[in-house]
Every structure is written in C-alpha cells, then in structure tokens.
Image (cartoon, helix red, strand yellow):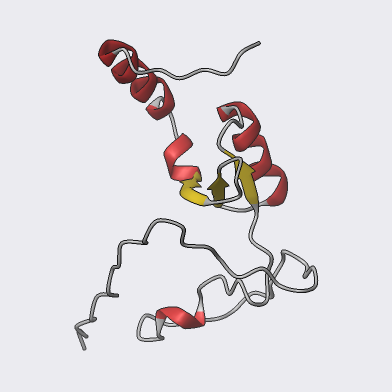
C-alpha cells in the first residue's frame, strides 16, 4: 500500500534565534531506534533537549569541521558567530567531494572571499 506523506512545514528562523542549552551534558550517542516509513519524523530526530548539539565557530577551517564530524560520528554542526548567535548549519553533505572547492572557486570569481589573518 502506497502512503502519502505530508511534508514537514518549513520556517525561516528570525535573526537572533537561539537553541536550547541543556542544563547538564548528555552523551551524544542515542540508542538505535527501529522505525518504519509511516513513523512521525519527531521519532527519529535529534532531540536537543536530551542531546547537547555540537557547535563550531564561523572561523573553523573546513578540514577541522570535517574532522569534528568524523570523530564525533555526527552529520551536522551548528555554526555560531563570536557573539554566540546561531548563523547556520554545516552538514556532512556540504563537505562531500569537491563541493567546498567549487564554492571557493565561485566566491573567488566574485571577489568575495573572507579570510582570517594568519
């Protein structure tokens, strides 16, 4: 039987949107959960009220971000700025293959590459 799924609603985050900070540190590994296609998405999502999200700074080099993802066995990092404001999400898919090089080449062509001083 083919079942139609309702898409999850998408919402643009307002400037200054934060995230939940648990009062205690929880292990980043959650037990394996068996699921089937008709289970609600909330059943398999990462619950930040139970698991501390992994953060990285905007200035983190791509290689370091990739190493964090591999070491912690996770697929995404929340990216924050110097004022601890959430500014984005970096996923393992963002770092696949030559994608970072293609993005850098495109930015170089536009003349909008930002670097930190050495």
Q: Quadrant of the C terminus?
A: top right
Q: Residue at x 63, y 77 (%)?
A: 49
Residue 28, by quadrant, is bottom right
Q: Please, is residue 27 above or below residue 115 in the view?
A: below
> Across the whole image, how many numbered discs are drawn on residues?
0
Asked if 115 appears above or below 70 in the picture, the reply is: above
Q: Horizontally, is 114 left or right of 32 in the view?
A: left
Q: Position of residue 83 (x, y in %)?
A: 60, 46
Q: Position of residue 116 (x, y in %)?
A: 57, 18
Among the 4 quarters of the image, the one containing residue 54 = bottom right
Q: Residue at x 71, y 72 (%)?
A: 22
Please provide percent x and percent y for residue 71: 72, 44
Examine the rendering and report whether any part of residue 35 can be seen: no
State the residue in front, 58 or 66: 58
Q: Residue 14 placed where, x, y %?
A: 36, 61
- Work out whether residue 48 or residue 19 is closer to the camera in this orientation and state it: 19
Hey, which residue is sitting farthest bottom in the picture? 1
Tell me which residue sits at (68%, 70%) in the image: 51
Left or right of 6 on screen, residue 40? right
Residue for point 70% across, 50% down: 72
Q: Is residue 113 above or below residue 92?
A: above
Image quarter of the N terminus: bottom left
Taking the image as drawn, is residue 116 in sight?
Answer: yes
Find residue 9 and report its image quarter: bottom left
The reply, left or right, for residue 46 in relation to residue 108 is right
For this rendering, which residue is in front, 55 or 69? Answer: 55
């Amino acid at each position: 039987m083919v079942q139609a799924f309702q898409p999850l609603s998408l919402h643009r985050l307002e400037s200054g949107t934060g995230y939940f900070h648990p009062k205690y540190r929880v292990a980043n590994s959650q037990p394996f959960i068996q699921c089937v296609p008709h289970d609600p998405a909330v059943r398999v999502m990462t619950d930040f009220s139970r698991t501390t999200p992994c953060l990285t700074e905007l200035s983190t080099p791509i290689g370091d971000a990739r190493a964090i993802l591999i070491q912690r066995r996770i697929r995404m990092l929340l990216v924050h700025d110097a004022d601890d404001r959430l500014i984005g999400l970096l996923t393992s898919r963002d770092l696949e293959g030559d994608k970072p090089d293609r993005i850098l080449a495109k930015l170089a062509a536009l003349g909008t590459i930002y670097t930190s001083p050495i």
